[in-house]
Amino acid sequence: MHNRTLGIIGGTGWLGRAIAEALLDSGFISPDRLLVSNRSGTHTFEPPVRLLADNQQLVALSDVVVLSIRPEQFRELQINAKGKLVISLMAGIPAAAIRAATGADAVIRAMPNAAVEIRQSFTPWYSADSLSEQDRALVQGLFECVGTADEVPNEDCIDYLSALSGTGPALAAMLHQALVSQAVAAGIPPAIAQHAAQGVVVGGGQLLARHDPQEMIKALMAYRGVTAAVVQSMADQGIDAMVGRAVQQGAEVARRGL
Ligand SMILES: NC(=O)c1ccc[n+]([C@@H]2O[C@H](COP(=O)([O-])OP(=O)(O)OC[C@H]3O[C@@H](n4cnc5c(N)ncnc54)[C@H](OP(=O)(O)O)[C@@H]3O)[C@@H](O)[C@H]2O)c1
């Protein structure tokens, strides 16, 4: 962080705490340059990380402020962040609303997901203002501490991706559930159905970290056997369109605002 101080409002929550811990573990920030705030006063950080009860004090002491509170909690947040770089992790709150409410000089919207916990989040981020190269590197580096990150060209990408990667494990979990319930309906004992679905979602997911998914499908289709029949049936029944409609539905919620 090049001697800059980072304050995380809501830094004791699920996302905020996971990010703070990753920043400390990776040495991206030194503990004396990290501030967190919440309302309850409870936290698990060791000094010299400081927990503040006063958000305005946190803002005053920080160069960069991360908003890691829930969208509905934002309405009650009262800070003046003039002169600061504000990075919001909140879904469905536009950059213009964040600037209007905080007076921040530069507003960034970023959308990590629950995989911050294992440092495998994909985090798209958008800057509503022109950024110095130093600030761009800071934002990219910050989110690379919890996985991979890409700057996106417009704010709508954030709303769309909130419904895609922002959902974290939700899509994979839905596939898992469908596989289990259909296998049980087909007469497979429930415990075995669970193991089989786990193999598909977790084992298959890990394999795809090393192989290109498109190439993988091509190779499996070439056998013209059981796998090819399953894949072809999913394609014929419009899996692309179904996934597209589901993600658009979520994106609409993000666009409408929370
Ligand atoms: N979790 C996810 O998978 C995920 C994915 C993408 C984006 N997001 C976004 O990330 C944000 C945080 O989500 P989360 O899951 O980490 O929520 P969370 O676990 O509920 O954390 C919110 C934190 O904010 C604190 N807080 C609330 N109001 C505050 C205030 N006025 N001042 C200071 N601290 C305050 C809460 O602590 P106290 O109650 O002690 O104040 C809590 O520690 C949300 O906006 C969400 O849209 C989450």
Image (tube, rainbow, N blue to C red):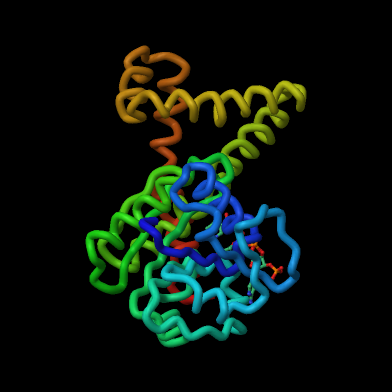
User: Where does the image place residue 29, in percent across and percent down from the top left?
Assistant: 47, 52
Q: Is residue 147 above or below residue 226?
A: below
| Front-lying residue, 4 or 220 | 4
65 left or right, relative to 154: right
User: Looking at the image, which residue is at 65% across and 39% down?
Assistant: 177
141 left or right, relative to 49: left
User: Where does the image place residue 250, in percent across and percent down from the top left?
Assistant: 49, 62
User: Where does the image place residue 178, in percent across and percent down from the top left?
Assistant: 62, 38
Q: Is residue 51 above or below residue 218?
A: below
Ligand 1, seen in the image, is in the quarter at bottom right
User: Where does the image place residue 104, in percent across and percent down from the top left?
Assistant: 40, 80
Pick the quarter of the image with the C terminus.
Answer: bottom right
Count of picture labels:
0
User: Looking at the image, which residue is at 70% across and 28% down?
Assistant: 194
User: Looking at the image, which residue is at 39% across and 37% down?
Assistant: 236
| Front-lying residue, 27 or 102 | 27
| Front-lying residue, 10 or 120 | 10
Question: Which of the 4 image quadrants contains residue 179?
Answer: top right
Residue 254 visible: no
Residue 190 visible: yes
Q: Is residue 239 above or below residue 60?
A: above
Pick the quarter of the image with the N terminus.
Answer: bottom left
User: Looking at the image, which residue is at 60% across and 62% down?
Assistant: 11
